[in-house]
Image (spheres, rainbow, N blue to C red):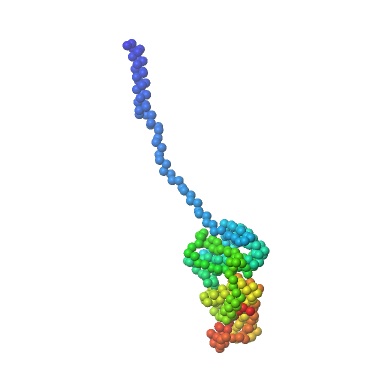
Amino acid sequence: MSKKALYLLGIAITIILGTYLYVEFCCNCAIKTPAADTEKVSVVVAEETIFVPFILNGSGIDYHTNDNIKFLKNSFAVVLPVSDSVAVGIENLKTFLIANPKQKITITGYATSDETNSSTFENLGLARANDIKKYFVSKGLSGSQFDTKGEIVDKWKTSKDTLLGPAEYKFETPEAAPAVTTDEWVILKDKINGDPLILHFSTNKSSNQLSEAEKQKVADLVKYMNHVKDAVILAVGHSDNVGNRDSNVVLGQKRAEFSKNYLSKKGIDGSRITTDTKGPDEPIGENATAEGKANNRRTVITIK
């Protein structure tokens, strides 16, 4: 073999060997294995949207919105203002009831068993139903077309400390409406007048300190006035004999007016409550004793 051939062969071997060594040892030098992606991906959990619809469904009216009347936990007062969609529903109800004056609706208010009842009603659900009725009346609806009930349940849908729509509205039909005879209302009136509600003014006693028996008397008054359309309440104020008679007559009238306002807040139309005063003229206790004077400072509430 000539020198030239050997020279060319050496060059070829060198190229082949160099290529092999490069591929074997250096080809992967610049290639990096991707590191496992350990970055955490945050997961956003959408907050659950809770709906308790406001539904008015009767013969001739069908209104539905996902918003509703609300109450704070342990409270019987409607949270104001109500939403626009609820306000529209109330206006629709007003129009419907004007066109159907014989229509009766029963509002059932609900409260949970772990809530505290600070109202004068026998349970918080009933207090809520009456406050809804009161709100409806403030918007021009007729209170005589509403009955109220209250129920205690184990739980209700809430958003934080707010109960969502704890009430239902049942549109009574003439067939479904309970038939109550005149005698039953006579019996209730006799019960109210035979053992009347008496509000005393000797110890600055506030409305939420009424006894259970007194709360029941308030409930009986509301029930009677809701059903007997021409009924009128009489609130008569009395005083002890401290001071001159004219001043005590005025004081008795102020007590009667206070009692009228109190009953109006319970859903009784103020125009159906009359007031009078007897001043110190009809004592039931001895004015010679502190206890007797305290008993004489009172308002007696009856049905005329």
- Name the outermost residue toward the front: 175
Q: Quadrant of residue 11?
A: top left
Give the quarter of the image for residue 300.
Answer: bottom right
Q: Residue furthest top?
A: 2
* Left or right of 25 on screen, residue 175: right
Residue at image position (39%, 36%) is 33
Relative image position of residue 75 (x, y in whole percent): 53, 66
Report the side of 113 relative to 25 (left or right).
right
Residue 184 seen in this snapshot: yes
Extreme-left residue of the structure: 1
Q: Position of residue 18 (x, y in %)?
A: 36, 23
Can you say which quadrant of the picture contains the N terminus?
Answer: top left
Viewer-side residue, 160 vs 102? 102
- Of residue 102 and residue 275, the one placed in the foreground of this image is 102
Q: Is residue 24 above or below residue 209?
A: above
- Residue 92 in the image: x percent, y percent? 64, 60
In the image, what residue occupies the spot 35% across and 28% down? 24
**Quadrant of the frame with the C terminus:** bottom right
Residue at the (65%, 62%) spot, across then down: 96
Q: Is residue 301 above or below residue 42?
A: below
| Along the line of sight, the residue nearer the viewer: 159 or 122 | 122
Q: Residue at x 63, y 60 (%)?
A: 60
Where 43 falls versus 132 (above or below)? above
